[in-house]
Amino acid sequence: MRRVCFVLKVREDRLAEYRRRHAEVWPQMRRALSESGWHNYSLFADERGMVIGYLETEDFEAAREAMARTEVNARWQAEMEPFFEGLDGRPDEGMIPLTEIFHLP
């Protein structure tokens, strides 16, 4: 499994609602993520809206492409897009993986 970490920025004035939405992720979205190869997926946020995502997957590009083909992801991304700043397009298209520089297994 490959470990993937990425950063996104949520608008500070939308952070509370962003957190609420993620406390109630749709069951169809959860299922689509799992079926598309997203495992051990977590999001972390600080009070300024910096969001760190972490997941494990066999193939990140294949997992992203599989999600992009789902109807539920299209709906979720459309609802989440207004929460973010500094993106040109959908949030799932703005995820740029960070380079791992250390790992303690």
Image: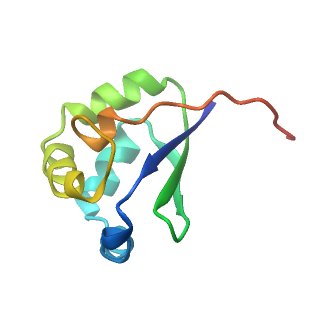
Q: How many marks do you count on the picture?
A: 0
Q: Is residue 82 left or right of residue 18?
A: left
Residue at image point 52% right, 63% down: 45
Q: Is residue 68 left or right of residue 63?
A: left
Q: 19 or 12: which is nearer to us?
A: 12
Q: Position of residue 28 (x, y in %)?
A: 23, 57
Picture quarter with the C terminus: top right
Q: In the displayed structure, would residue 63 be above or below residue 73?
A: above
Look at the image and tell me whether residue 44 can be seen: yes
Residue at image point 35% right, 61% down: 11
Name the quadrant containing residue 69: top left
Q: Position of residue 2 (x, y in %)?
A: 62, 29
Residue at image point 39% right, 72% down: 19
Q: How is the image coloured?
A: rainbow
Look at the image and tell me whether residue 18 can be seen: no
Picture quarter with the N terminus: top right
Q: In the displayed structure, would residue 37 be above or below residue 29?
A: above
Q: Position of residue 72 (x, y in %)?
A: 17, 49
Q: Position of residue 56 (x, y in %)?
A: 57, 39
Q: Is residue 52 left or right of residue 75?
A: right
Residue at image point 28% right, 36% down: 67
Q: 72 or 31: which is nearer to us?
A: 72
